[in-house]
Amino acid sequence: MHLRPYLRTPSPSAFRPRNIAKALKLLALSITLHLTLHSPSIAHAHQPFFEDEDTSVDSPMFVVDPDISTALYGTIDRAGDVDYFAFTALENSRVLVAITIPAIEGQKDFSPTMAVVGPGLPKAALSKSIHLGEYSGHGAIEIRPTSPRFFFEPFSRTSYWSRQREYIQIPRTATYMVAVWHDSKDSVGRYVLVVGEREVRGGDPQFASKIDAYWKPVVPAVRDQTPLPLWLRFLSWVKEFAPSS
């Protein structure tokens, strides 16, 4: 019986430059395929979007499916700024909401607060800077920041500090609002609001180009230091000290 040897001496032609280049290409293709199938950036993909225009209670940024992990890249860019988001959820569902802070220079202590507002939630006293609009009279759950926890996010290849994370039990099928603000009027910075946890690829197709512009410290708006004209200062003084009727 003739047995084929398990190892054979390669022929001299195997070491030709063309064959070596071909083998290297096949090796690179195999490695790429392996990384594609097993990479955390694929297994843990989420859907990123940017707050391209400032939001309001009447024009919030809407999350299409609160079950799908959606990362909303927002900015508190001035004193008293409040960002508004919204999602529609089914009764008795649980929706994950979380805030992470991009690891940009000077942001480790940036710690915004968020609140979920909507029908059936417990009554809560929120910051006076929040305009509730049509949500006035509804309950709310305020979620305050915790100590920062550093982590690396493989999908965007960027690092963050995790600040708060909570599951909201939805009491009624309805649209709920999420407000994000900072208690200190002098604090500005970048944050990422995460809604949902089921990983599905998608999001802003221009994410790769937008993230570079986003990943910079926020420059606070410079307040106008021009002194008021004398007559305006006089009127202000009269209004301040005039007896009330």
Image (cartoon, rainbow, N blue to C red):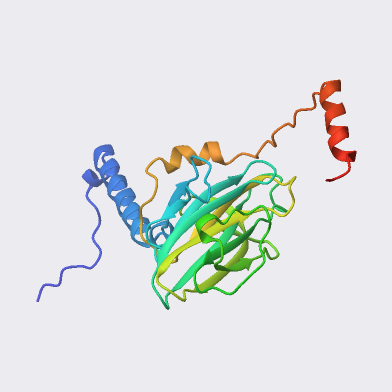
The answer to whether residue 213 of the structure is visible from this angle is yes
Which percent across, then down, holds residue 172?
43, 74
Residue depicted at 30% across the width and 50% down the height:
29
| Up/down of 2 relative to 194, above or below | below
| Residue 89 falls left or right of residue 82 | left
Of 214 and 230, the residue lying toward us: 230
Residue depicted at 64% across the width and 41% down the height:
77
Residue 209, image quadrant: top left
Residue depicted at 88% across the width and 39% down the height:
242
| Up/down of 198 relative to 231, above or below | below
| Residue 36 falls left or right of residue 172 | left
Number of marks in picture: 0
The answer to whether residue 153 of the structure is visible from this angle is no
Which percent across, then down, holds residue 236?
83, 32
Of 24 and 144, the residue lying toward us: 144
| Up/down of 55 relative to 90, above or below | above
Q: Tell which residue pokes out farthest to the left in this image.
A: 1
Of 35 and 53, the residue lying toward us: 53
Which percent across, then down, holds residue 25?
29, 45
Which percent across, then down, holds residue 117?
54, 64
| Residue 239 falls left or right of residue 105 | right
Of 143 and 72, the residue lying toward us: 143
Residue 233, image quadrant: top right
**Quadrant occupied by the N terminus:** bottom left
